[in-house]
Image (cartoon, rainbow, N blue to C red):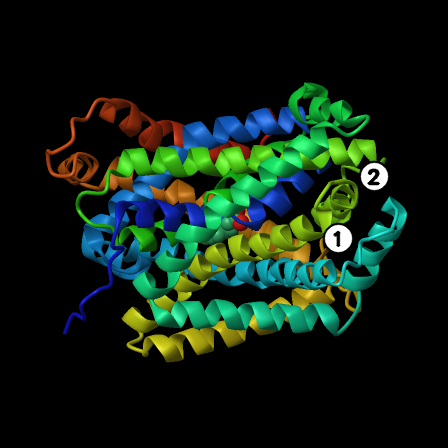
Amino acid sequence: MQKKRDNFSSKFGVIAAAAGSAIGLGNIWKFPYIAGENGGGAFLIIYLVFIILIGVPVMMSEFIIGRKAAQNVFGAFRSLSKSGFWKIIGVMGVLAAFFILSFYGTVAGWTIEYLYLAVKNSFAGKDAAQIEEMFTAFSTSTYKPVIFQILFMAITALIVIRGIKKGIEKYTKILMPMLIVIILYLDITALSLKGGMEGLKFLFQPDFSKVTPKCVIDALGHSFFTLSLGMGVLMTYASYFKNDTNLTKTSISVAAADTIIALLAGIAIFPAVFAFNTEPAAGPGLVFITLPNIFEQIPGGFLFSILFFLLLGVAALTSSISILEVVVAYLSEEKQISRTKATIIATSLITVTGVLCTLSLGPLSSFGIFGLNIFDLLDFIASNILLPLGGMLISIFVGWKLKRHIITDELSNYGTIRLTSIKIFIFLVRYLAPISILIVFLHGVGIIKL
Ligand code: PFF
């Protein structure tokens, strides 16, 4: 028997939830640090091109499949195609969800620790070197980051158990706009720092001599990661969309909001990196090392540091619930397990791997594969391999397999919206997206040389 499925109750709720999934640590923690590692401006341009030409069409594809099928990822492909092959997207998606949430929980745990430090006013009176030392000592210690990670995972699980309307939608709607206001304030302060302009140059002035195959594949992987694409998250959310949601507009709004937040985060961080003479390629600690320096300088810094880490934690939460939802929807609908039980099983398993990620930055740091510790390895496999491949298959499915009338029905809301750019969309999902993903991929792993 088919259970009645939950729905989003308002249009704003739909956008807020999809944007809530997209906007998260990827924008504020990961974007600045991989842009820093890949030389800034040139990386930014490649990343923007991928967002527009690949990200948006793949997002529209996920929306089309999800809303049409109104099921979890596995059920969706089963109901839209006779071939069992497409199940692979679901398998890769669940695996990617598992990997991503493992290291995501580590960093989200850091935000809770930093919230606690902010409340204790622990950044006060410290110079840049001491703040950096604080991060290193904390992130490499054994118990503390693990405890905060477990706490974060427990909160994620509690929200997911409550379901869509009461959980996910309610929290995203209020908190995301607040985050934007705080980041804007940080931007203004960062730009007024002495030497800050150097940071803006770093972020916006492209130096194409810095473009390497790694830079291109990082940009592709990050465009999927930041938009929550390639693993069925937005497909699962779209399965709760109503029939009057405009799929094209929603995709563009979500991608635009996501990109703007990443840029605003970059504008807050790089001027501070240059003003305080810290390292733009500092890696995963970048935000946690840089921003406390700004809080030290600004009027109301104590209060803003508390609010910032609180909202960063919330942004992480609205993303982590969307990741967990993929695994839970799969277990509860495919394996007929109750939602609560599915959530508890998934969360426990992910937390175990997650703790290994956390420890891989400290006590387990000598344990690595291909020169990467567990944390970086899971990030690499999920973001740079599973998500782009998932995205490629999703666009191939919509471009080549799905009946054309389903695409036009979904994009036009059954004839109620005029379709103007359907040909461009078809071209992007049939040719441009899959071919460019394949090329970047083969180039990135060294199979072809351009
Ligand atoms: N998009 C989220 C972020 O930028 O923080 C992370 C994420 C959520 C990745 C959901 C993948 C995903 F399916």
The residue mark sitting in front, 2 or 1, is: 2
The residue under label 1 is which amino acid type? Gly
Q: Secondary structure at mark 1?
A: loop
Binning the other alpha carbons within 10 Å of mark 1 as few (below 14), some (14 to 19) or many (20 upward) gives few
Q: Which mark is residue 371?
A: 1
Q: Residue farthest to the front?
A: 299
* For residue 378, side relative to residue 229 (left or right): right
Residue 393 occupies quadrant: top left
Binning the other alpha carbons within 10 Å of mark 2 as few (below 14), some (14 to 19) or many (20 upward) gives some
Q: Position of residue 443 (x, y in %)?
A: 58, 33
Residue 254 occupies quadrant: top left
What residue is at 53 percent from the left and 37 percent from the top? 261
What residue is at 51 percent from the left and 32 percent from the top? 439
Asked if 363 appears above or below 281 in the picture, the reply is below
What separation in Å lies between label 2 and label 1 (alpha carbons)?
A: 25 Å
Please name whichever residue, 51 or 194, is drawn nearer the observer in this view of the structure: 194
CB within 8 Å, label 2 to label 1: no
Q: Secondary structure at mark 2?
A: loop
Residue 168 occupies quadrant: bottom left
Q: Position of residue 334 (x, y in %)?
A: 29, 70
Residue under pointer 2: 278
What residue is at 38 percent from the left and 51 percent from the top? 17
